[in-house]
Image: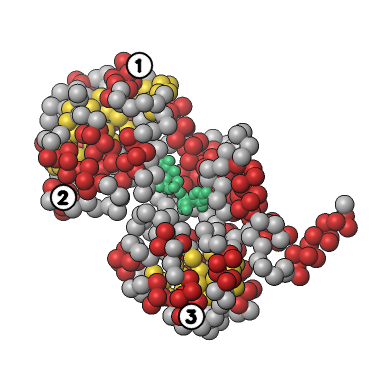
Amino acid sequence: MARIAIVGTGYVGLTTGACMAEMGHTVCCLDINRRRVEDLRAGVIPIYEPGMDTLVATNVAAGRLRFSADYRDALSNVEFVVIAVPTPMSDDGQADLRYVVTASKQIARSLTAPAIVINKSTSPVGTADRISGILEAARPEFGPWSVVCNPEFLREGCAIDDCLHPARVVLGSRDMVAAHAVEALYESLDCPAIITDPYTAEMIKYGSNAFLAMRISFVNEVARICDALGADVTTVAKGMGLDPRIGSAFLQAGLGYGGSCFPKDVSALAGMAVSAGLDPQLLQSTRAINDGQRDWAVKRLEETLGHLEGATVAVLGLAFKPDTDDLREAPALDIIQSLIDRGASVRAYDPVAMPGAERLGVPALLCGSIEECVSGVDAVLLATDWDVFIHADWARIGQLMRGTVVFDGRNCLDPQVIARHGMNYLGVGRPGLVERTSQREARERIAAVA
Ligand code: UDX
């Protein structure tokens, strides 16, 4: 079993640290934020992630996991150091590597013996070499340094399961001995490993995230066409997904993707392509469709209500997806702003993201329950497919509302149930119970051309 230090206790760092301890390794998670380290030592988990509190507590109690705010303390006597710091989007859309650079310098200064450095932060092609260069320059006596790019594919909300049961382990290095040493850290996991050069490993991460984002934008574009013509995108996606060459994952039409990864990674990959003199049209369209999906939804609601000026809308769900309190790039936030810009009043509720919404100053009336949120509104817009909304008492919601429009922005409700309670169901690319004239006319135009 190995001795490992993890730099960064965000989603990737904390999950990796706790899971590596669970695999039997001895792990110290380091964060420069002392308050966060004190909280973690007291068992307070800084992120909303189901099961993380128990996993951390169990491994701390077993003596395999500890937390430190001091580089020298965390890195003393370790064989591996994992970099798991944020790589946010900079103003020009590229990945901002300042935290990776700072962490690399600190690692070089703090180690008292050579160690293998593993980069888990999503970073552009060439970053592993850049880290090597920083380490070599700072501590040539420990060279040649071995850096292994080992991207993480975990999803918020099921991060522990993704980390302990990955579909693959990707390792990219110029030092094959180091790559195999990192592979051995994961030997208790039952999955294939891809061992390659660092550029390829770095590209696998961007390729994977951009491809999944592209599928979502694809299905959202199909949803808009379905909406215009009167077809049902949920059944279209089901029919497409049953083809094993396509598969059903990431074909759920809705308000588009958000979160800390897809928006910034699509943008960073497009930026890499532009820097290489290319014109990444599919990546640009993926992004444009995703941004446009939010406007499309607001316009669709406006069209249904007749006007948004003076209307009151309840937004159910603020987090970018269920099972997380993460509001980064959440479609709900743009939609709220757009509704307000068009003269609507907005009330909002989320089962876990309300403290974050308050901190951000979300410009809606923040409510304490579904009932409070929907009382007296003209329309409900469901922005996050939380179970509590799917299984809500829609009969009661119908009674509390002033109007009747329910816009299901995640296509997760049963239109028949909503209609049975006297409400007017509107989905993303799902036909309503009453055919729109525009849909019939569009089909007639197509048939006439054919
Ligand atoms: C993603 C990747 O899945 C993960 O491998 C990577 O390491 C980090 O980025 P995450 O951002 O946690 O994980 O969320 P994910 O579950 O992938 O969903 C991303 C977004 O896409 C959410 O906003 C979700 O609502 C949306 N989505 C997902 C759809 O709109 N339709 C789908 O079919 C699937």
Dot 3 surroundings within 10 Å: few (below 14), some, or many (20 or more)? some
Tell me what residue is drawn at x 35 percent, y 64 percent.
351
Q: Can residue 294 be seen in this view?
A: no
Q: Can you identify the residue that label 1 sits on?
A: 176
On the image, the x and y values in percent for residue 14 come to 26, 43
- Rendering quarter of residue 73: top left
Q: Name the residue nearer the viewer: 361 or 429.
A: 429
On the image, the x and y values in percent for residue 192 come to 41, 24
Q: Can you identify the residue that label 2 sits on?
A: 43
Q: CA gap, disc 1 to disc 2? A: 38 Å
On the image, the x and y values in percent for residue 17 come to 24, 37
Q: CA gap, disc 1 to disc 3? A: 65 Å
- The residue furthest top is 177
Which tag is nearer the camera, tag 1 or tag 3? 3
Q: CA gap, disc 2 to disc 3? A: 43 Å
Q: Name the residue nearer the viewer: 179 or 216.
A: 216
Tell me what residue is drawn at x 38 percent, y 33 percent.
166
Dot 1 surroundings within 10 Å: few (below 14), some, or many (20 or more)? some
Q: Which amino acid does label 1 sit on?
A: Met
Q: Is residue 396 visible?
A: yes
Dot 2 surroundings within 10 Å: few (below 14), some, or many (20 or more)? some
> Viewed as shown, does residue 288 lie left or right of 103?
right
Q: Can you identify the residue that label 3 sits on?
A: 399
On the image, the x and y values in percent for residue 244 come to 60, 34
Q: Name the residue nearer the viewer: 178 or 297.
A: 297
> Viewed as shown, does residue 343 lie left or right of 75?
right
Q: In this view, does 184 lie above or below 281?
A: above
Q: Which amino acid does label 2 sit on?
A: Gly
Could you tell me which secondary element the residue under label 1 belongs to? Answer: helix
